[in-house]
Image (cartoon, helix red, strand yellow):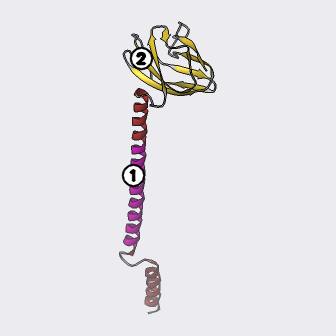
Amino acid sequence: MKMKILYSTIIAAALSTVPAFGAEEKTLGEKTSETLGKAAEKTKEAGRAAVDATKSAATAVKDAVTPDRDAQKVEVTLTEHRIEMPRAIPAGKTAFVVTNSGKMKHNFEVEGQGIEKKFLATVDPSETKTLHVDLKPGNYKVFCPVKDHEEKGMDVTLMVK
């Protein structure tokens, strides 16, 4: 009889530490629901980030082809080993409208007075892009940074007054 009481006491003690049937499932369900909620929030954040990145990319493309209304427009023509453009312009917001009339890919870079700006991608033959730069008075080096194009004559000194 003592043995039965001992076993009953042990079993009762063991059962008192085990949650009631279904209680563990509820905790697991709550955890699953919480995890899914967090995943949904992260997905929303990723979606917002993708929308913002797409808007930025669309703006960059627009900027690459459309001169700002308040910018002075400077026409630039690139051909093999030559940059045709004015050698002196006034200071201020400037939209370089760059057309590649050559047969090779080129680029257009402006350096000077703390500025170093160029197109992220090359300008393909027959393509026109716009590079916006806020120019301060001083001298600028304008060149094609593709391969050896600068050494072959695709460089200009631009004087900004």
Q: Do the residues labelled 2 and 1 touch (CB within 8 Å)?
A: no
Residue extending farthest bottom: 1
What secondary structure is marked by label 1? helix
Residue at screen point 63% across, 23% down:
137
Would you say 83 lies left or right of 50 here?
Answer: right
Quadrant of the image occupied by residue 54: top left
**Mark 2 surroundings within 10 Å by alpha-carbon count, few (fewer than 14), some (14 through 19), many (20 or more):** many
Depth order, front residue of 125/69: 69
At label 2, the amino acid type is Thr
Task: Please state which of the two labelled residues, at mark 2 or mark 1, is closer to the viewer.
Answer: 2
Q: Quadrant of residue 97?
A: top left
- Among the 4 quarters of the image, the one containing residue 20: bottom left
Of 39 and 158, nearer the camera is: 158
**Which comes before the other along the chain, label 2 or label 1?**
1
SS for callout 2: strand
Residue at the image point whose x is 43% and y is 87% from the top: 8
Quadrant location, the N terminus: bottom left
At 39% across and 53% down in the image, what residue appears?
A: 44
Asked whether residue 120 appears in the rendered view, the answer is: no
- Residue that badge 1 annotates: 43
The magenta stretch is 24-52
| Residue 124 located within the stretch drawn in magenta | no
Q: Which residue is tagged 2? A: 99
Q: What kind of residue is marked 1?
A: Thr
